[in-house]
Amino acid sequence: MPHQNSSMASSPTPIDPHPSSSSKPRRASRQWSDLGVDLLLCIFPRLSSLDLLLAVSAVCSPWRAAARHPQCWRSVNLSDWDSVSVRVCARVYIPLDKVVSRVLGFMRESELIEEVHFPLIARENDLLFLSQRLPNLRYFSYPSSKEPGTIFRAPLANFKSLKGIAVHTLYGIIGLLRWHFPDFSELKLLGEDYFDSRKAKVICKLLPKLRKLEMPSSFGTDTDAVLIFLSSLEHLEYFDISGCISSIDKKQIENASRFKDVYLVFPKAN
């Protein structure tokens, strides 16, 4: 029998069925900055104004650029002033206009801001400052309990297209709203504790285009006043009477709203 070549006779090298992890191809790592702008703009508008200004903007340049996008700043909420003042400068008090100026200086196209929520410490100068910097604002919340008659006169004259406000009381300003904003459509009353038929008729006459009316603190409002709002405000879509703890006739109110496309928020049952 002829002699076989030793190289040909040798058996093949066996394949290891359990290769070590070092032999696996390593997946390329990705950076936070690699996230696309479209994805960031789906997330960032859900964050608070302070998170955008102080946290997100410090991650990387792409995140900072996305955080300045107008889509993230449709609403500026400064109502929790304790958190705002501490996070901005680590002290108890900072002038409100300084914070607003910092926000406006950070974002692009600040004129596209649609709504601003003031803290309880807001004063007349703060509202005037805002009206001068953001004349196209559509909505603001001003929770101070001071009567707004003289406080609001100059700021309301500066706003061009205001659609809604949240205020402690309408005393002294309802005529101004009618005069400056014929299409005014959203009202939230933070402090009015009682509405009778007379008050309801005044509001319906001077603000006939209301689509959203919220009275979460109006514990003394009676059934007749609620029925007047329902029958007179033809454009009403949302009506919050959750603060009414007096004896309102829920059945009668529901019947009156049957033929109107309006969402009613009643007081919670005890």
Image (cartoon, rainbow, N blue to C red):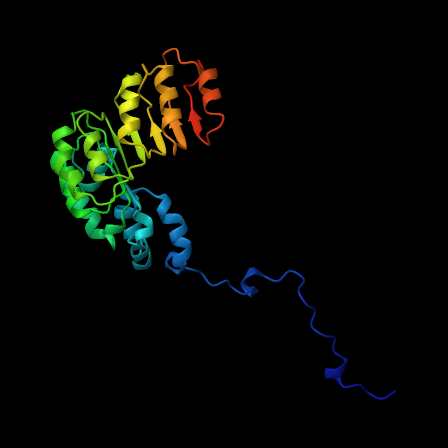
Name the quarter where the N terminus is drawn.
bottom right
Q: Position of residue 244 (x, y in %)?
A: 36, 17
Q: Considering depth in this image, is 228 or 20 the residue closer to the camera?
A: 228
Q: Position of residue 267 (x, y in %)?
A: 41, 19
Q: Residue at x 17, y 30 (%)?
A: 121
The residue positioned farthest toward the bottom in the image shown = 2
Q: Residue at x 34, y 18 (%)?
A: 225
Determine the image quadrant of residue 85.
top left
> In this view of the protein, can residue 25 be seen by the observer?
yes
Q: Position of residue 195 (x, y in %)?
A: 29, 18
Q: Residue at x 23, y 26 (%)?
A: 168
Q: Give above or below for 193 relative to 188.
A: above
Determine the image quadrant of residue 156.
top left
Determine the image quadrant of residue 208.
top left
Q: Is residue 266 left or right of residue 179?
A: right
> In this view of the protein, can residue 189 be seen by the observer?
no
Q: Considering depth in this image, is 48 or 192 the residue closer to the camera?
A: 192
Q: Position of residue 224 (x, y in %)?
A: 36, 16
Q: Is residue 173 left or right of residue 243?
A: left
